[in-house]
Amino acid sequence: MAVDNLTVIGLQWGDEGKGKIVDALAAKSDYVARYCGGANAGHTVTVGSERFALHLIPSGILHEHVVNVVGNGVAFDPEVAIGEIEGLKERGVKVDSDNLKISTTAQVVMPWHKQQDLLSESQLGNNKIGTTARGIGPCYSDKANRSTAIRVSELTDPEALAQKIKLVGAIKNEIFAELYDADPMDIDTIVEQYVDMGKYLAPMICDTGSMLRKVVTDKKVLFEGAQGSMLDIDHGTFPFVTSSSVSACGIPAGTGIPPKHVGKIIGIMKAYTTRVGAGPFPTELDNEIGEKIRIAGNEFGTTTGRPRRCGWLDTMIVKYTADLSGVDELSVMLLDVLTGLDELQICTGYSVDGEVLEDFDPSLLGRVECQFETMPGWTEDITGCTDFGQLPENAQNYVRRIGELTGRKVGIVSIGPGREQTLTHESDIEGLF
């Protein structure tokens, strides 16, 4: 089957390695479009000896021919975006109005959103969600509230923008003073900053929905997810989730394209499981093995630097999220991290109060007991393998077992951060790399 449009989504709690696969697939794509999340995302791409950490700019930016789109479903932080753009330019990466398009209808993250994050988490104490404090949740809250939201299109009209910031800023100052006894924000300074940032970004701001609808049938569009499906606002481990629809279900609403053009869906998963912040984690390893995985996998947040919680692979989660988005193929990432472990365990099922669960229910995740299957590990260095058949037999069997338990083909296996450390296995997508 010829490569048509493609979608890349995370199937766990984020940090699965989506940036690497998007970067690889972007080489044969015309457009890369982000449809959800904001600067709370952290996509890492390694090119040779260089490492790029992207938060808002789509991961296709390292390919000059690709048009990168920040869709309307994104919580857009102008300050972070400009910092990324300037940082990329300093490293010789082309970023301008030709290859970066920002939706007029995306929501703008404002300073009061970040302050709200910090104040709310502080007040919640031990019950805090574990937000990245990037203002994402409060930004989406204002989107739903409508009257206090600011859209990217408003950045291009300095006078109207100044009036809106003063109006909403006064409201936020009053709320923060009453609820948190917080000092007032300097609204005049915020006006000056955002007017300047609007002028900088104006050439890149356009109606991206209309643009994508015009090209989605005859150009190759790659839709880039952010976070992981278990953090989806509707289908994840609520309330310990992000504030947007991060599964493939969110693509039409987050980009303005018809659902039928989402294309083939590649689900990205780690060969083990990690999570950042609070919330249930049935296979968590709070022991030496978990620490070994954390160190070997460099499991520290790209966005926050926080150490990630690590645990065995949970195929109950992966099957649930793959079914949710209609995933066509899996991409198993960081297989090399498991090298050196004598035995590996895979969670293959759950029970609650002694009763085996037939279906996955995220609301029960804090109560489940895992049913584990043990498999032998491997000690051979796999980072230099160039073909799936070169992997140790136990590593091959581990990958095959993932496919069996999830009911999906494993099309891609990643054995290191480099572009060349990517193996194709059972992919039905022609010309994947």
Image (cartoon, rainbow, N blue to C red):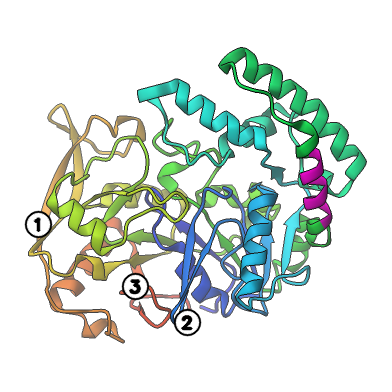
136 or 120, nearer to the observer = 120
Q: Which mark is residue 374?
A: 1
Side (left or right) of 375 relative to 87: left
- Specify which label sits upstream in the sequence, 3 or 2: 3
Asked whether residue 220 appears in the rendered view, the answer is no
Residue 146 x/y as whole percent: 74, 29
Circle 1 sits in a helix, a strand or a loop, which is it? strand
User: Residue placed farthest to the top in the image?
Assistant: 178
Q: Nearer the viewer, mark 3 or mark 2?
A: 3
408 or 94, nearer to the observer = 94
Badge 3: residue crowd in 10 Å (few <14, some 14–19, many ≥20): many
Give, as a single range, the part of the protein colored magenta: 191-199
Circle 2 sits in a helix, a strand or a loop, which is it? loop
Q: Amino acid at mark 3?
A: Ser
Q: Which mark is residue 433?
A: 2
- Specify which label sits upstream in the sequence, 2 or 1: 1
Disc 3 designates what residue? 414
> In which image quadrant can residue 203 be found?
bottom right
> In which image quadrant can residue 167 be found?
top right
Tell me the residue at 61%/53% (across/down).
35
Residue 104 x/y as whole percent: 79, 50
